[in-house]
């Protein structure tokens, strides 16, 4: 391929990807705002308090609560560990694990922009149904380990603003916390996943021959099975999966049902989280968890295709002639979204003071430094911090997400207790050391 051809291919990919970003951006920016509202008024700690001691109603509430929360398939793990810690049954925990990463207000908004509101609404019902079935089956199959019959524990070690009035962030206005969570914390967690998803959609549209997959695998059950096998081990968040599904549906000829299977299987499970689920729920529940996601995804895809055939209509958003003002709005919104997603790179250049490093000075032999495996987002960091601060002797815990480290200060610290607390939160400590010199904990205190 010549340099000119390579440049043309790159421009085609950029054009397709920018088109997808333009369609998504007004909706995802609104989704970030609504996610911020939910983070202030419906926190994970609130969810933990309302899941009772077990039973079908607890499973239904867990599946329902999980739908709007902006938690991806990595962030849902520590929150689910908190549910178990606060007394939720395995069934309720499984329902929450399945339904939560499939959706989220920002993901529903993106699906509506690219695939249409009927598809987005059907996807929400599919997420609820999948979580309900998975949780109920775990309650039936794994009875011998289903909770302890006691109500959730009243103590709450959460130190974030949602639960702790002494936290400095709790003293800030709700409006500030809404915008900070939606456009800083959540956008910071999702920036790479969203951009990768948009890029992949551009590659599919610009490089792959049109309708290639539809011609080779058809639009029946086989296509859904292949989408299931493709999605199950893949780590892709709900927001990033939508542009990929859109490209497969619009340019590769797969059926809406097959696209839905990918949207269910991709976010609901991945190779990294399955091992954590195994530790959290055990072998039986993990098997039921995977089977529930697989079977319900296929059934939902078949039902969606049946509805489309019966109604003789398509669900995907139709992009016809658009007013000039709306085209301009989408482009401005896309530029704003790009700036929001990439703020961690440009903000320190514009406001050097915002990148001020926090320094913790510990004398030789004081405190501990933990290397933690499995933290991938702010929810993970908050869960690890909360777990450490609940240990005896801990005065403070600073999580450095970028380096996968925790710096713990206190007296008479027990390494085994710290490691056990991190494990209970859903992560793994790979190394514990004491400082041999002054420690520079560069980064923000999560």
Image (tube, rainbow, N blue to C red):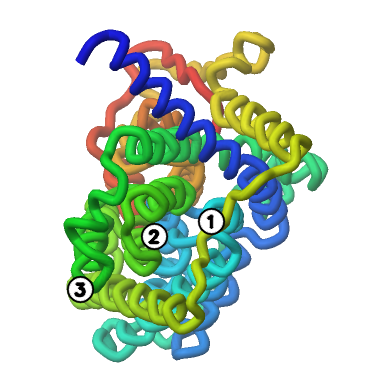
Compute the Cα span from label 1 to label 2: 10 Å
Residue positioned 63% across, 59% down in the render: 43
Position of 191 with respect to 414 (left or right) is right
Q: Residue at x 25, y 72 (%)?
A: 220
Q: Where's the N terminus, which quadrant?
A: top left
- Residue density around tag 2, few if under 14, some if 14–19, many if 20 or more, within 10 Å: many
Instruction: Please tell me whether mark 1 or mark 3 is closer to you in this view.
Output: 1
Query: In the image, 443: left or right of 232?
Result: right
Label 3 sits on a secondary structure element that is helix
Q: Secondary structure at mark 2?
A: helix
Name the residue: 33% across, 56% down. Answer: 253
Q: Find disc 3 in the rendering and name its residue.
A: 287
Q: Name the foreground residue: 206 vs 292.
A: 206
Real-space Cα separation, disc 2 to disc 3, in angstroms: 20 Å
Q: Nearer the viewer, mark 2 or mark 3?
A: 2
Residue on which disc 1 sits: 111
The image shows residue 60 at horizontal and vertical percentages of 50, 83
Residue 85 image position (x, y, % from top left): 43, 67
- Find the distance from the CA under tag 1 to the CA under tag 3: 29 Å
Q: Is residue 61 visible?
A: yes
Asked if the residue at tag 2 contacts the one at tag 1, i.e. Cβ–Cβ closer than 8 Å, the answer is yes
State the residue at coordinates (43%, 57%): 76
Q: Is residue 344 above or below residue 35?
A: above
Q: Which residue is label 2 attached to?
A: 263
Position of the C terminus, as image quadrant, is top right
């Amino acid at each position: 391929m010549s340099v000119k051809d390579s440049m043309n291919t790159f421009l085609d990919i950029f054009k397709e990807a920018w088109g997808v970003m333009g369609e998504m951006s007004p909706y995802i920016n609104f989704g970030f705002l609504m996610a911020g509202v939910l983070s202030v008024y419906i926190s994970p700690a609130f969810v933990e308090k309302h899941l009772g001691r077990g039973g079908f109603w607890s499973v239904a509430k867990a599946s329902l609560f999980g739908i709007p929360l902006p938690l991806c398939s990595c962030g849902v793990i520590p929150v689910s560990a908190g549910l178990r810690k606060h007394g939720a049954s395995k069934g309720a925990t499984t329902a929450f694990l399945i339904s939560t990463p499939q959706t989220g207000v920002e993901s529903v908004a993106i699906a509506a922009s690219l695939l249409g509101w009927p598809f987005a609404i059907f996807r929400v019902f599919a997420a609820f149904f999948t979580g309900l079935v998975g949780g109920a089956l775990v309650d039936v199959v794994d009875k011998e380990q289903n909770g302890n019959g006691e109500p959730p524990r009243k103590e709450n070690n959460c130190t974030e603003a949602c639960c702790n009035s002494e936290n400095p962030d709790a003293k800030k206005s709700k409006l500030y916390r809404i915008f900070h969570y939606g456009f800083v914390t959540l956008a910071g967690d999702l920036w790479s996943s969203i951009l990768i998803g948009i890029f992949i959609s551009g590659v599919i549209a610009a490089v792959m021959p049109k309708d290639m997959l539809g011609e080779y695998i058809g639009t029946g059950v086989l296509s859904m099975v292949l989408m299931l096998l493709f999605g199950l081990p893949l780590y892709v968040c709900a927001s990033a999966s939508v542009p990929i599904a859109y490209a497969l549906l619009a340019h590769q000829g797969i059926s809406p049902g097959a696209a839905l299977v990918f949207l269910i299987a991709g976010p609901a499970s991945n190779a990294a989280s399955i091992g954590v689920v195994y530790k959290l729920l055990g072998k039986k529940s993990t098997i039921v968890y995977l089977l529930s996601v697989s079977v319900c995804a296929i059934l939902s895809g078949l039902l969606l295709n049946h509805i489309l055939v019966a109604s003789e209509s398509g669900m995907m958003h139709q992009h016809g002639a658009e007013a000039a003002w709306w085209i301009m709005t989408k482009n401005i919104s896309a530029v704003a979204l790009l700036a929001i997603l990439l703020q961690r790179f440009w903000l320190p250049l514009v406001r050097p003071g915002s990148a001020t490093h926090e320094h913790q000075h510990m004398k030789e032999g004081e405190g501990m430094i933990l290397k933690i495996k499995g933290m991938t987002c702010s929810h993970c960091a908050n869960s690890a911090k909360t777990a450490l601060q609940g240990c005896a002797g801990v005065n403070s815990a600073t999580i450095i997400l970028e380096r996968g480290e925790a710096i713990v200060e206190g007296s008479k610290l027990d390494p085994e207790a710290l490691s056990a607390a991190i494990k209970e939160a859903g992560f793994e400590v790979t190394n514990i050391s004491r400082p041999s010199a002054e420690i520079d904990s560069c980064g923000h205190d999560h």
